[in-house]
Image (spheres, rainbow, N blue to C red):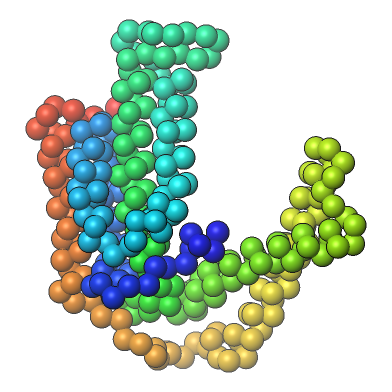
Amino acid sequence: MTTLLAPVRGDRVVHRINPVAKIAASAVIGLALLITIDPVSASTALACVLLLLPFAGVPWRALLVRLVPILVAAPLTALTIALYGAPSGEVHFRFLLITVSDGSLALALAALLRVLAIGIPATLLVATVDTTDLADGLAQTWRLPARFVLGGLAAFRLVGLLVEDWRVLVSARRARGVGDAGGLLGRLRFVGGLGFSLLVFAIRRAGALSVAMEARGFGSGTRRTWARQARFGRAEWVLVGIGVAIAALSLAASVLTGAFTFIGAR
C-alpha cells in the first residue's frame, strides 16, 4: 500500500508541474468519457494516454505495480457487464440471470476501455504528485480553506502508518500465541480483532495529532503564510491543454464515426 501511495521521484518537468494542473487535465479526460459510453471515444483517449506514457517520468516497473488494481478491475467490470448487462441484439448465451448478447458485449468493451482510459491518467497523477505540493497547490491556486487542506495532508501522510500498525499488531498477537489458526471462523475473529485494534490506534493518533496541530496554530482563523510558493505557469497550462485536446479528440472521433451514445440513453 505504501508503494502504491509513495510518489516516484524524478527530475523531469512533469514532476515539477503544479499538482492542481495534473488534477485538472485528468478530470477533463474523465468528464469527457462520462458523457458518452462507446468504445470509440474511450479507445481514442486510451491511445493518446499510452502515447504520452514515455513522457510521464515514471519507470515502467513502478508504473506496472501501480496499475495492477486498474488492470484487475477493468476486466472484472467488463465481465460483470457482459453477463448481467441489459440484453439487446442477438443473444449468445442465457442462464438464469445471466444473458450474454451483442449489446451487453459492446457495453462491456466500452466499459473496459473507459476504466483504463480514466484509471491510467489517475494512476500517473498519484505516481508523480507529492502530497505537500498538492496541499500547496490546493490552498494557493484553488484557494481552498487552509484548515481543510492541512487536515487532509496530515491524514494522507498517516495512511502509511496504518500498514505498519497492522504488521506490529500481527507480530504482537502471534508472539503471545494468539494466531490466526482454527479454520475460517478463527481467521475471521483474528482479522476482526486486528481491525478493531487498528481502529482504536487510528482514533487515538488522530486525536493526538489534532491537539498538536491546534497547539501550533493550524486552527487559527488568521490568514497563514506558506513555506513554498505554488506556481501556475506555462507548463501547467500546456498540461491542461493536452488534457482538453485529448478529451476533444475523443468526443470528435466518437461523433464523426457515429458511435456517440449519451450516457443517459443507456
Q: Position of residue 210 (x, y in %)?
A: 63, 80
The x and y percentages for residue 199 are: 72, 62
**Residue found at x 34% / y 75%:** 137
Query: Where is residue 119 drawn, in percent x and y?
Result: 37, 48
Nearer-the-camera pick, 164 or 132: 164
Q: Residue at x 40, y 72 (%)?
A: 130
Toward the left, the furthest residue is 256
- Quadrant assignment for the C terminus: top left
**Residue 64 visible, this angle:** yes
> Total number of numbered labels?
0
Coordinates of residue 150 in the picture (x, y in percent): 49, 78
Task: Name the side, left or right, on which 223 lies relative to 230.
Answer: right
Quarter of the figure with residue 71: top left
Identify the residue shown where x is 44% and y is 9%: 93
Q: Residue at x 47, y 21 (%)?
A: 84
- Drawn side of residue 204 relative to residue 112, left or right: right
Find the residue positioned furthest to the front: 61
Is 159 placed above or below 75 here? Answer: below
From where the camera sits, is residue 143 visible? Answer: no
Report the side of 103 relative to 209 (left or right). left
Quadrant location of the N terminus in the rendered image:
bottom right
**Residue 217 occupies quadrant:** bottom right
